[in-house]
Amino acid sequence: MGGKLNHTLPIDNINISGKQTIEERACTLARYIIDSKDTVRGAAKKFRN
């Protein structure tokens, strides 16, 4: 394992394009949870495919 993995993150109301690293995805989710005061489960439902 050594390189960074890229994953796409489908998001409805947040403006993100292209692929993100896992670290970027975690930061995006954390920002969403903090800004919206949503729960982790709520955020998972929103960001799910």
Image: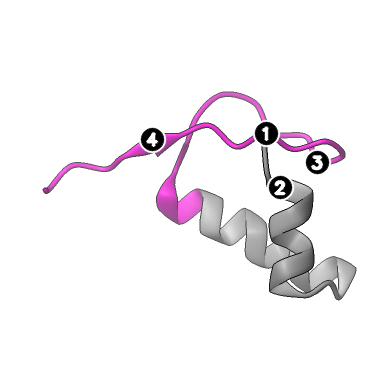
List the residue tagged with mark 2.
47
Residue 49 found in image quarter: top right
How far apart in space, not on screen, are marks 4 and 1 (Cα)?
13 Å
Q: Tell me which label, 4 or 2, sits earlier in the chain.
A: 4
Query: Are the residues flagged by discs 3 and 4 in contact, CB closer than 8 Å?
Result: no
**Mark 1: which amino acid?**
Pro
Q: Is residue 28 left or right of residue 26?
A: right
Q: Is residue 36 left or right of residue 4?
A: right
Magenta stretch contains residue 7: yes
Residue labelled with disc 1: 10
Could you say whether the residue bearing mark 2 is in a helix, strand or loop? helix
What SS does tag 1 mark? Answer: loop
Label 3, label 4: how far apart the Cα atoms are? 18 Å
State the residue position of label 3. Answer: 14
**Residue placed most toward the observer, 21 or 10:** 10
- Looking at the image, is mark 3 or mark 4 earlier in the sequence? 4
Q: Which region of the structure is painted magenta? A: 1-24
Name of the residue lying farthest toward the left: 1
